Image (cartoon, rainbow, N blue to C red):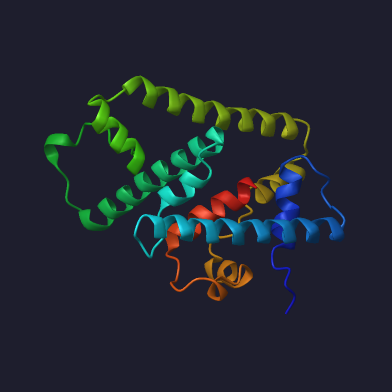
Amino acid sequence: MSKYRYLTEIQQMMYVFGEVQDPLPETTMLIEDIVRSQVIEIIVMATAQAQRRGSRFMAAEDFIFLIRHDRTKVLRLKEYLSWKEVRKKVKDRDDTADDIIDDANADKPDRANKVKIKLSWELANSFSDNIVDDDDDEEEMLDAQSDSLKRLRDADEITRRMTRDEYVHYSECRQASFTFRKNKRFRDWANMSAYLDTKLNDEIIDILGFLTFEM
């Protein structure tokens, strides 16, 4: 079996980010080699960071600590984790609600509040300062939204002159992922069993998929 498992996904991602629609196979394979090596490196480093915390298992904060100097990427990951938690809460609520309706709240809009992700070192700082700075939270949210809006504007500019068929293809390419419904393939591709004693849970795989896309 070929060691190249994501050539199609990488071609799609390259196209979305402004490259030609059909890049040279050699280029795509080189990118896959680079991405794989970076994924392995970040897993090894996150494992070491977890061990420093006294844990055998990686957590989201280990990855965020590793990318802490890239503020934009940190904000995007925290935003991703926040909305992922919201979707999980809504799904859990829907699964357990059955068909029970609260008549007192029937006319009130159902709102899903985004979860604020707090990291261990942020909690320590807030306790030591004995304050909670809502302005910092608001600033972080605005920064993350600003980056997302810029990406949407760029996508709008790219697709403005596309035909319907071209736009459909572009939309499909935007869904390219290393991990969505491909967890086993991702584990095998990164050869995780060679340097991990424990199996990564789905949440960590999702985080790795997000970071891999950002690479």
Left or right of residue 196, residue 24 in this image: right
Q: Position of residue 175 (x, y in %)?
A: 61, 51
Q: Which image quadrant: the N terminus? A: bottom right
Q: Closer to the camera, 70 or 95?
A: 70
Q: Is residue 49 above or below residue 75?
A: below
Name which residue lies at 68% across and 30% down.
154
Q: Height in image: 33 above or below 100?
A: below
The foreground one among 104 and 111 is 111
Residue 173, x across and y down, in percent: 68, 50
Residue at the outermost bottom position: 1
Residue 80 visible in the snapshot: yes
Determine which quarter of the picture holds residue 37: bottom right
**Viewed as shown, does residue 190 lie left or right of 141?**
right
In the rendered view, would you say 132 is above or below 119? Answer: above
Coordinates of residue 81 in the picture (x, y in percent)? 42, 45
Quadrant of the rendered structure where residue 96 is?
Answer: bottom left
Quarter of image, res 56? bottom left
Q: Residue furthest top?
A: 135
- In this view, the residue in front, 185 or 161, is 185
**Closer to the camera, 90 or 145?**
145
| Residue 205 percent coordinates (x, y) | 49, 60
Residue located at (36% from left, 47% from top): 85
